Image (spheres, rainbow, N blue to C red):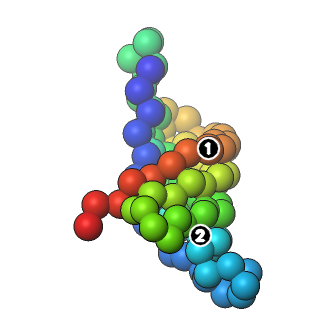
């Protein structure tokens, strides 16, 4: 199966005032998922998480959760969670 999602994220650096490199983030996006039966799901994704931004490298690590409202082929609520890393191109 294939799962692709795209999110627009906003960061809040004010939650932990002593740690400027530990923002919370939230956003909205979409996802498309296909499986081996050639069924395609399209959904709306609401995401929230926390990340650690390294001061000396263009890398962060994150944990996020994302409820998903699938719209096709039927309407249902799903959930994603993820732990990962991002590399920032400058």
* Label 2: element kind: strand
Label whose residue precedes the other's in the sequence (1 or 2): 2
**Residue 38 shows up from this direction:** yes
- Identify which residue is drawn at 59% across, 74% down: 21
Q: Residue furthest front?
A: 56
User: Label 1: few (<14), some or many (≥20) within 10 Å?
Assistant: few
Q: Is residue 58 left or right of residue 47?
A: left
The image quadrant of residue 89 is bottom left
**Rendered residue at 43%/46% (across/down):** 5
Graded by Cα atoms within 10 Å as few (under 14), some (14 to 19) or many (20 or more), the crowding at tag 2 reads some
Vertical placement of residue 65 versus 75, above or below: below
Q: Which residue is mark 2?
A: 25
Residue 90 on image: x %, y %: 26, 67
Which residue lies under the disc numbered 1? 82
Marks 1/2 in contact by CB < 8 Å: the verdict is: no
Q: Position of residue 9 (x, y in %)?
A: 48, 68
Of residue 58 and residue 75, the one placed in the foreground of this image is: 58
Give the quarter of the figure containing the N terminus: top left
Of residue 77 and residue 49, the one placed in the foreground of this image is 49
- Please tell me in which quadrant of the rendered image residue 87 appears: bottom left
Q: Is residue 2 left or right of residue 21?
A: left
Q: Is residue 9 visible?
A: no
Q: Is residue 51 above or below residue 16?
A: above
**Identity of the residue drawn at 59% across and 69% down:** 25
Tell me what residue is drawn at x 65 percent, y 52 percent: 63
Real-space CA distance between mark 1 and mark 2, rounded to the nearest whole angstrom: 14 Å
């Amino acid at each position: 199966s294939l799962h692709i999602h795209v999110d627009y994220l906003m960061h809040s650096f004010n939650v932990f005032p002593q740690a400027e490199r530990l923002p919370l983030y939230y956003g909205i996006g979409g996802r498309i998922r296909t499986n081996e039966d050639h069924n395609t799901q399209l959904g709306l994704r609401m995401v929230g998480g926390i990340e650690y931004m390294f001061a000396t490298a263009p890398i962060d690590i994150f944990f996020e959760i994302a409820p998903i409202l699938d719209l096709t082929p039927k309407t249902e609520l799903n959930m994603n969670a993820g732990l990962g890393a991002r590399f920032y191109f400058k």
